[in-house]
Amino acid sequence: MLKQSRLSLYTFLAVLLAITAVGAVTVPFVLSFAKQTYYRLQADVNERQAEAMTRFVTNRLQAGEDEQAIILEFQAAIEGTETDRGYVCLINQDNAQYLSHPNLQVIGMEAKPEALFDKNFSGRNPMRWQDHLKRGESAGGLLIYGPNMPTEVIYFNAVPGTGWTVSSHENAIRINVELRALRTVLIIGAAVLAFLLAIPASLAGRVVTRRYERQRERQNELERQLLEAENTRKTQELEEARQLQLSMLPEAVPEHPTVELAAFMLTATEVGGDYYDFDLADDDTLTLAIGDATGHGMKAGTMVTATKSLWHAFSGEEDLVLVLQKSSLALEKMGLPMLYMALALARVKDHTLELAGAGMPPALVYRAATKQVETIALKGMPLGGPGEFPYRKTRLLLSPGDTVVLMSDGFPELFNAEGEMLGYERAVEVFEEVASLSPEEIIAHFRETGRNWTNGGAPGDDVTFVVMKVKDKTESA
């Protein structure tokens, strides 16, 4: 709004000054000033367009898309643009060739080597446009093709780390037509009273203002379309990551003669990469895993997929520590950048429980005989880290009625409306309230507590539980 008001005011004042001065002397200076103003305002509009498309390219690079796909998406975004009015294109800095252009015949052609770029809108000391492009510069000004071709107001913006430049163009013919109309008004104004020509001058300012507003509306529409496309892409990526994550989970918990099992996972809005799995051997030895991959979205899904494969390969190892060490070494060799997997393992044979962990929350063990809850630390470097970490395991004897809870950090790290975290101590208290119930009832109580704590809000990370309870002798039989 401020720039629109300034444009209208400049036009009005320019007419008044031309009328009070000698027309033949004043008019050229006024026209020169008006031209500079119009060009710079148009360059501002072009700059916003170029920056919007630069963000468009940068966001896709950060999302890991390949360059050819980005160029195709860029081309789809600018299709239908009228090149005789204004357009946006993508240029290779190395050879000054068009990678994307509304005119498909231009793609692959070199930007005209004779085109000159006037950064100051003054016409003095212009330089070859290709030289600016190949140096990876960003600037706005006039693009002068030659005496028989229309001049353009442009702003070109280098895309960091790509060797590409986004260039926004606007044909200067319309501005020159408006300047000629203004010159006519000024000449007529020299022959009549100032107040009679102040009104037409104001009308001319409003015409330019409306033109500016239409350009701004087109820019807002372009930005809206880009934002909508970006949101659609992110939503699709999150849904794909969620489906991949869920496909990695077992279809059902196994039936076991010694323990009753239940498991649950609630995926967050930003998929967090939680995972659990079971392996039941022929001799009824039950081995289970619960994990939490670093990161969100497809990156976490990649780590879960890798962990799932390693689980099938190593879950039958006799020593849980060896399972962790082999899995960590395999993930490290995969070279996944900044991706790690926190993992807890539990193995039940008869009434003996073995626990081993790599960076997971502590296991909670309820002793039916004493009605007390023990916490078993599952500390250790997450899988995929450097070197061979000395993982440890803990062996416990379980009695009928004893219950073991393994969870990811999503539950204890829930936040309420006041920004307070639920915390691990409160998680233990929640377990104590229902530790004597069945695994399904325990999980239901955890879920209800989480909903009440967040007031029904979505969790910021995945929430996962695996609960097992030692059956009574009559149940085992």
Image (cartoon, helix red, strand yellow):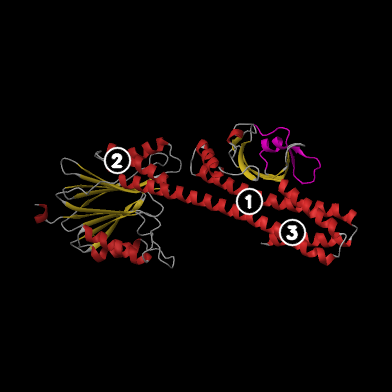
Q: Residue at x 40, y 65 (%)?
A: 416
Most foreground residue, 355 or 114: 114
Sequence-wise, the earlier of marks 1 and 2 is 1
Residue matched to label 2: 311
User: What main secondary structure does the magenta stretch of the protein show?
Assistant: loop
Q: CA distance from mark 2 to mark 3?
A: 75 Å
Residue beneath disc 3: 204
Image quadrant holding the N terminus, namely: bottom right
Which residue type carries mark 3?
A: Ala
Q: Residues within 10 Å of mark 1 (few under 14, many from 20)?
A: some
**Label 2 environment density (alpha carbons within 10 Å; few <14, some 14–19, many ≥20):** some
Does residue 131 appear to the left or right of 62 in the view shown?
right
The label on residue 48 is: 1
Label 3 vs 1, first from the N-terminus: 1
Disc 3 on helix, strand or loop? helix
Name the foreground residue: 62 vs 352. Answer: 62
**Relative to 45, is 387 on the left or the right?**
left
Report which quarter residue 367 is drawn in: bottom left
Disc 1 to disc 2, C-alpha distance:
51 Å
Tell us which disc is closer to us: 1 or 2: 1
Q: Amino acid at mark 1?
A: Arg
Q: Tell me the amino acid under the disc marked 2.
A: Trp
Where does the magenta region start and end? 110-137
Q: Is residue 134 magenta?
A: yes
Left or right of 197 in this view: 46: left
Q: Position of residue 291 (x, y in %)?
A: 33, 48
Task: Assign a secondary structure to mark 2.
Answer: helix
Q: Residue at x 81, y 42 (%)?
A: 124
